[in-house]
Amino acid sequence: MPEPVLRAENLIKRYRRGTQIVRALDDVSLTVGKAQTVALMGPSGSGKSTLLMILGALDRPDNGTLYIRGKNAADLSYEDLVEIHRSTIGFIFQDDHLLPALSLRDNVALPLALAGIKGPELEQRAGQLLDALGLGNKLDALAGELSGGQRQRANIARALANDPDVVLADEPTGSLDTQTARQVMDLLLDQAQARKTAVVMVTHDAGTAQLMGRILNLKDGKLAGQAGKA
Amino acid sequence: MNGVAPYARALIARNPRRILVYLLGLTLAVGLLSSVLYFVDGSAHHMMATALKSLPVDMQVVATDPQVDLGPLQSFISRLPHVRGVARFDLATFAASELVQGDRRTTTTSGALIAVRPRYRLLFSSLRVVQGGFDPRGIMISKDLATNLGARPGDTLTLRFRAPVQPVAMKVTGIVDLTGSDLLFAPTDPAHRAGAFNPPANVAIMDLGTFRRELEPSLAHLSGDNSSTPGIVSSSQPAVSRQIHVSVDRSALPLDPGTAEFMTTVLARSIEKKVPGRVVVLNNMYATLAQVGNDLLWAQIILLFLAVPGIVLAGYLSRYAAGTWIEAQRCELALLRARGATPSQIVAIVAAVSLATALGGAVLGLAIGLLTNLLLLGAQILRPGNLGLLINSGLIALVAGVMLAATATFIPLRALYQEEIRSGRQSVRRSSARPLWHRLYLDFLMFAAGAVVLWLTQRNGFAPVVGGEGQVTLSLSIFTFLAPLLIWVGAVLILARLGHGLVTYGTRLFRGILQTVFKDTGVYIARSISRRSQPLVQPALIIALALSFGIGLGIFGQTYRHQQLVDARLTLGADVVATPQKGHARTAAFARQLSAIPGVASVSPFTHAQAYVGTEIQDIFGIDPKTFLDTTHLADTFFVGQTASQAISQLAATRNGILISPEMAQDYNIAQGDTVKIRLLDQSTNTYHTTPFQVIGAVQEFSTAPKDAFLVVNRDFLDQQIGSPDASLFLIRTDRPPRQVAAAIATKFGPHGLSVQSIHEVAVQLATSITSINLTDLLRLEWAYIILITSLGMMIFLLGIFGERRREYAVLEALGASRAQVRSFLIAEAGLGGLIGLSIGVIVGFPLGQVFVSVLTALFDPPPSHPYIPWVDLSVLLGLSILGILAGMALVAIRLKRLQPAQLLREL
């Protein structure tokens, strides 16, 4: 049986809110296998984004263990974590977070450059990705010159630039209209499928969640249930 | 929502670092403002002290009733507050003085006879003994009387009075250099006192006890008609003017000349009230203080001119720091609105926050300002008499600080909130549009306007003018100050525009450098900077403005100090001057002894004598041409038609050569090569004889004689003519600090009667009124703040960038950038901003120094031939600025290390 891309066991994350300690995640366990697509649903404050940040190794759990491609994240050095962000995990944020002073091509090429790719290949790959996402004519545009849908497509291209094993998306279509949201989702899932990339996506939208292979519901920091297509 | 205070407190507490940075900026602005205001007040005191220094007697209490007993009044005055001391001073006239030497009899015209106790000289500076001493059994005479009679200590002098008073013969015990004759001998009745009069040249000083015993009884019987000796007392006064001289404790004078004037008036009135109508109090301090009051106004303008740019810069920095804090308030305001706060509640909260921060920053600034001035001016500013001015300056700084803070926080915060409401958005992005000055080409306009104003003011002669002869007058146009300000700001903005263009369009140039330094990310850093060059220009501007102003001030200050020393050297003659007193060695052998002292580079003996040109008495200087140029500084501009070295070489080649003044050449129609006959006193025979000299040129200024008419000859020849091989003084050039060498000479020879002076002491003594404003300390104060502005400017800028872009940095980390790679984005931007700022600062600073020197050239006496650059000081300024920038970068790098990407990426 292949090693899952992500495996979380009994994750607990607490926050201090004033004098109170709040459990943002309360004994959450889940596994994300290769090319799987998972939707994380739940009301505001249920811990979805916290879980996504821990799965992306941008935050640490107070208790529990996260395995990334079989390795305990707690045992990884700073350099290992940097390497994981370069090669294993891609991020898509709700507020696109494209670097405003760089062109779309540079935004997509930057993760490649950080990963050590040099020369013509770098810009060629970035161009191809943007082309595949329908932004071939916007290579030199800045983020501020694009529509919300275009920005999110560029965001997807950047997340996929290094062919990661998993893309973690935090409500990527949250601020888009239904039609654009559907187009963006289709593009994301098509690209993920083509690359055998797993996708874990936080969403409030049941329709969007239905596009994913598995749906996990979080409530008060606990996994309340899950549904799957297969 | 209940109460404004808790929310205002929360707004402040939630952004402690940004609020701290903002407070730092505000503290700096208020600190500098209050420092300068305190300083200006302190300067008033300094100016007063300098102006009063030359006043020989603060008040003269003159008896108008011959019967009034001055004894009890003297005791009364001595007990009055602020009185340092009192002494009796009687004044009479003599009809003639006479000296018989062998079969030669020399007689003078009338003169003044002063009678004082020996301790008078301890309280008042008008009688300086240059030869001999005060002996109650003898008489001292003024230098002029000594010259006129050819009298020396030991001679017996006869004073003749109007009949029937019998002549008095007394032994001359000393020669006195008399200062303040204008006041001592001016008519004592107010109607005549202000009028012009010639003080007597022939003055004799005797002991008051002797005078009362031997002369006063008979003089008292004379009528009051003293018209034969004009200027001593008016015709209505008695033959003997009985006076009490009052010395006021000047350290007790308030800082403000007006208040000081009032204080002395009250003192004078309280004396007059004691014996109404029987004495007149002549308040000599009053006129001096009134003059200081006028000069102070202009001095304050000059000080503010030099200080305001620093204050504006600190204010700009504060405004920038406030901007970064306001940016952080966007979400807070949105949240408040979401929680149901009404617009008026939000405005009230914003006002409360603004007021609290303003007061905090202003109070801190006042404390810093006070501390700085305590360090610079000493504890005197805390004296009770000065508290009013201190509070006044403090209040002005406080109000200005609160206004600055209101402009910097309340108005933008309120505008931000209104913008939010209008746009209905939760976030308002800072505009990245080009600033107004950039769009309107204000940089070129200001520079051109500055150049035109400079040209006009120079052409029309609008400039601060300091009159000669110690009397300071000013003809000063406010436009004078406009030129450097416009040129400074205009030039910096033009270069900032160029820098902006270079960064925006010169990406290829930077790309290569940044790729070399930052490797894989270099190209993206270069592209990012080129598209976001506007924010980079702001800190570059602050650094450039601060540094250029600092450099300009430094050059101006160095030139000012240099010219002060030139003036001092001109007056003193050399770095150090050693003057042997009576009985001390004066020979060439002694010059060799002086040369052996460590730090003495060269010694030149100098003879100073008196000579008659026709009936006019003039100073004649005997110099040693071989050593003179090695020892002292002679500017070529001192000589007419030849250089200094040409003139001195020609003197060396012509044994009886003489350099005369251009006025003398003109008055007597004398040309180079002519022979002039000078009457000299032969000290061995005590007789005058005529010596022919050959004119070799004209000299208008000379070491030891900056102003008076004089003649310069070969010392060997002069010594032979006056029959004395002794030098009057020794000019010394040092290769160590003059003060140090002077101290070494004084330690070795001082106890044996050698008086030693260095140029530093003279520089302090020379300062009069407006030229005495303490520019050195002001420049030091400005520099301290400029270094703070430069380093804090970079730190505040970097924290601003960090605050704006921290989410970008979090995204970079999520994309796989290492901390070092993230840091490289920040460092590159900061480094480039710093580099541009430093470069512009240096480029503009040097010409700015030249402009400062040019427009304030009238403050220099003599005018400088070129600006002087304090290389060491400027290196320190530049080095500290770079260190400040690096410290700012290091601080932000630490903040970057604590970045929490997960938290930042989840924020709205």
Image (cartoon, rainbow, N blue to C red):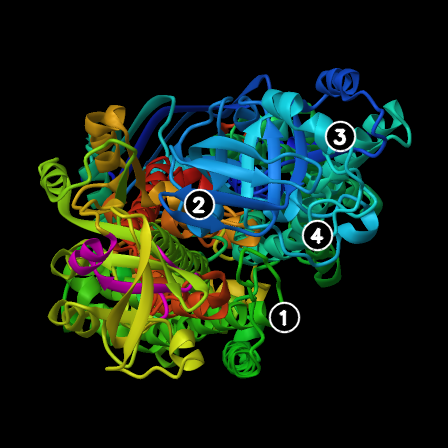
**Callout 3 amino acid:** Ala
| Chain of the residue that carries numbered disc 3 in the rendered image | B
The disc, 4 or 1, on the residue closer to the chain's N-terminal end is 4
Asked if labels 3 and 4 share a chain, the reply is: yes
**Which stretch is magenta?**
B700-722
Disc 4 crowd rating (10 Å Cα; few below 14, some 14-19, many 20+) is some
Residue at image point 56% right, 60% down: B430
Give the residue number, with chain letter if any, for mark 3: B5
Calculate the distance from the C-alpha at mark 4 to the C-alpha at mark 2: 21 Å
Q: Position of residue B722 (x, y in %)?
A: 25, 53
Residue where numbered disc 4 is placed: B228
Residue B755 colored in magenta in the image: no
Mark 1 sits on what residue? B477
Q: What's under tag 1, amino acid-wise?
A: Ser
Give the residue type that dot 2 points to.
Answer: Ala
Please report contact status of discs 4 and 2: CB closer than 8 Å, yes or no. no
Crowdedness of circle 1 by 10 Å Cα count: few (<14), some, many (20+)?
A: few
For residue B146, which numbered disc appears in the image? 2
Residue at the extreme front of the image, as rendered: B103
Above/below status of B480 relative to B21:
below
